Image (cartoon, rainbow, N blue to C red):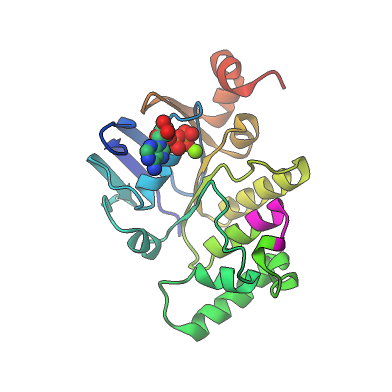
Amino acid sequence: MAAGLELQGVVAGYGQGDILRGLDLDVPAGRITCLIGPNGSGKSTVLRVISGLLAPRAGHVLLAGRKVTGCSPSAMLGHGVAHVPQERSLFPAMSVWDNVLMGAYINHDRDAVARRATEIAQRFPIVARRRHDLAGSLSGGEQKTVEIARSMMLDPPVLCFDEPSIGLEPRARRMIFGILDELRRDGRTILLVEQNARSGLAVAQDGAVLEAGVIRLAAPAGQLLDSPEVGRLYLGAS
Ligand SMILES: Nc1ncnc2c1ncn2[C@@H]1O[C@H](COP(=O)(O)OP(=O)(O)O)[C@@H](O)[C@H]1O
Ligand SMILES: [Mg+2]
């Protein structure tokens, strides 16, 4: 099922300015690539370009070697690329179950969607346990788990996660990183953006550092963890 992603010379931004300035990034199939970089450097923008929320001004996005540049978000979902955004994205006044069903909004076969949701509920027990509860009543870690469950509704070979551990307490954080590792062991391709660079690189096989709109460093994740310069800039004292 694995499919790799590649960004080639991507230029993108909002309004007048460019945030990404000719960015090249390789996200190899069946692995976790962790993208780190300072606040405001454009990490979320990279994910928005991949998921079709923001069309690049130049450059290309390739999925399994095929150009998908400028596809709409629903087309990218259809191509098998899911995006779990940084901000909380569940509909708080809808039930957990209905939120999960929304993950398959491009599939109009309601029976097939319901069957898939039942499979998802087996894999993510919180979906079964809290199915009738309003999504807004769940804890942060539970909501993130339901967001991930929702992103799995179309069985995507490629998943992009934008700071999934942000704002979570340590136990919930570990649980989320454990889920990412399981998804990778299924054979999925994962692009993980993390402020918590140490934990992100620890679960990843590959790492990349975004600075001033380009990838300044791409290396095996372990090598970035051991790099004194990366350590000083991104890993803190812990
Ligand atoms: N919707 C938007 N409109 C205008 N500027 C934006 C928008 N989203 C992000 N930006 C700006 O683009 C830059 C990169 O943002 P972002 O990709 O969110 O960075 P990161 O995820 O690395 O913190 C920031 O300077 C931010 O203020
Ligand atoms: Mg961001």
Label total for image: 0
Q: Quadrant of residue 170?
A: top right
Q: Is residue 189 magenta?
A: no
Q: Residue at x 63, y 41 (%)?
A: 166
Q: Residue furthest bottom?
A: 111
Q: Is 143 situated above or below 167?
A: below
**Camera-nearest residue between 53 and 156:** 53
Residue 42 appears anywhere in the view: no
Task: Pinpoint residue 194: horizontal percent, then vertical percent.
Answer: 56, 36
Residue 146 appears anywhere in the view: yes
Task: Pinpoint residue 115: horizontal percent, then vertical percent.
Answer: 57, 81
Name the chief secondary structure element in magenta: helix
Q: Residue at x 66, y 61 (%)?
A: 136
**Camera-nearest residue between 154 and 104:** 104
**Camera-nearest residue between 119 and 39:** 39
Q: Residue furthest right?
A: 171
Q: Is residue 3 left or right of residue 194?
A: left
Q: Quadrant of residue 123?
A: bottom right
User: In which quadrant will I find the C terminus?
Assistant: top right
Q: Is 192 situated above or below 80?
A: above
Task: Pinpoint residue 237: horizontal percent, then vertical percent.
Answer: 70, 18
Q: Which residues are magenta?
A: 137-144
Q: Residue at x 58, y 22 (%)?
A: 234
Q: Residue at x 30, y 49 (%)?
A: 65
